[in-house]
């Protein structure tokens, strides 16, 4: 288990209208990353960060990751006419991983962390990235638009729960059941390659789009994680604050 305490929410002071100081306090959050590739990925990112040219900073990498996700969505949409664009989508997912994963590591290695800025920008970009990625899939013809929309909604709902838990419980969970963002990218890349050879599969005597099956499984998984996390965190907060009131 890789636990790294970060100041995802730090202390902010601002000038008030009457000349006083209004202090806004944010709880520190603890990163929880327990995915299959977490240990190997951390070593790889530290190696890359140590060799990143000085003129490249974390903002450049954040922009690179965002551009990679937008480009992946465009490639999926174009795959409706040219299936080989699926290879472009796989390459763009790799670019997204590089930028999205390395930006925070580079900032920590160089002691240039901006906790509130980084937390906010990273997750706002994640929201837009999910929209472009799922939008591209919906236009690709390889997944029913309703399934793509279901994946987008499930992702956004789960994200809301994660952000609320980060603020109220001081824990920021990056993985569930050994799966994190990197594992999801790997599965999506493998699935995209499989579409070149077998976009349709047969189950129980009926034909289904491969990504429809995968998408329904993904929606079910995220919905289950969301439900269980919401119940567990609600009970945890109820018990903690009941003791404080008692």
Image (cartoon, rainbow, N blue to C red):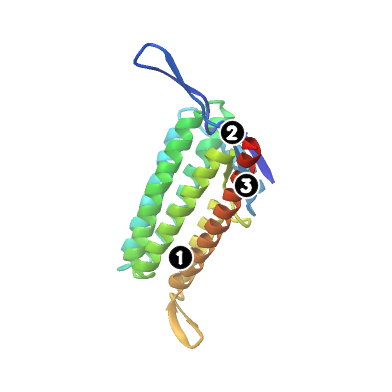
In primary-sequence order, the first of circles 3 and 2 is 2
Q: Is residue 145 visible?
A: yes
Q: Earlier in the sequence, mark 3 or mark 1?
A: 1
- Determine the secondary structure under disc 3: helix
In the image, residue 155 sits, relative to residue 25, either above or below, namely below
Q: Residue at x 53, y 36 (%)?
A: 104
Residue named by callout 3: 236
| Residue occupying image coordinates x 51% and y 64% | 190
Q: Are marks 3 and 2 in contact (CB under 8 Å)?
A: no
Quadrant in the picture for residue 238: top right
Q: Is residue 201 above or below residue 80?
A: below
**Kind of element beneath mark 2:** strand
Residue 212 falls in image quadrant: bottom left
Residue 29 or residue 114, whichever sits in front = 29
Within-10-Å neighbours for mark 1: few <14, some 14–19, many 20+: many
Q: Residue at x 62, y 41 (%)?
A: 242
Residue identified by numbered label 2: 6
Which of 55/113 is in front?
113
Q: Is 131 left, or right, of 30 in this rendering?
A: left
Q: CA distance from mark 3 to mark 1?
A: 40 Å
Q: Is residue 83 visible?
A: no
Identify which residue is drawn at 69% across, 46% down.
1
Q: Tell me the CA gap for discs 3 and 2.
A: 22 Å
Q: Which residue is mark 1?
A: 192
* Image marks 3 and 1: residues in contact by CB distance under 8 Å: no
Q: Position of residue 153 (x, y in %)?
A: 41, 58
Between 100 and 193, the residue placed more toward the observer is: 100
Residue 1's label in the rendered image is none
């Amino acid at each position: 288990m890789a636990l790294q305490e970060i100041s995802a929410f730090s202390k902010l002071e601002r000038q008030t209208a009457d000349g006083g100081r209004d202090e806004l306090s944010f709880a520190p959050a603890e990163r929880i990353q327990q995915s299959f590739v977490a240990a190997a990925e951390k070593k790889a990112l530290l190696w890359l960060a140590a060799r990143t040219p000085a003129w490249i900073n974390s903002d450049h990498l954040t922009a690179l990751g965002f551009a990679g996700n937008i480009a992946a969505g465009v490639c999926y949409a174009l795959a409706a006419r040219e299936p080989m664009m699926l290879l472009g989508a796989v390459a763009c997912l790799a670019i997204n991983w590089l930028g999205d994963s390395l930006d925070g590591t580079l900032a920590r290695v160089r002691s240039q962390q901006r906790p509130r800025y980084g937390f906010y920008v990273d997750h706002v970009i994640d929201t837009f990235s999910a929209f472009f990625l799922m939008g591209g899939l919906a236009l690709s013809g390889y997944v029913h638009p309703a399934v793509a929309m279901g994946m987008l909604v499930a992702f956004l709902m789960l994200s809301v729960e994660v952000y609320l838990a980060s603020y109220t419980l001081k824990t920021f969970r990056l993985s569930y059941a050994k799966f994190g963002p990197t594992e999801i990218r790997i599965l999506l890349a493998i699935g995209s390659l499989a579409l070149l050879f077998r976009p349709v599969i047969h189950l129980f005597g009926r034909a289904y789009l491969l990504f429809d099956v995968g998408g329904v499984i993904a929606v079910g998984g995220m919905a289950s994680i969301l439900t269980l996390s919401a119940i567990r965190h609600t009970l945890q907060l109820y018990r903690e604050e009941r003791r404080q009131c008692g």
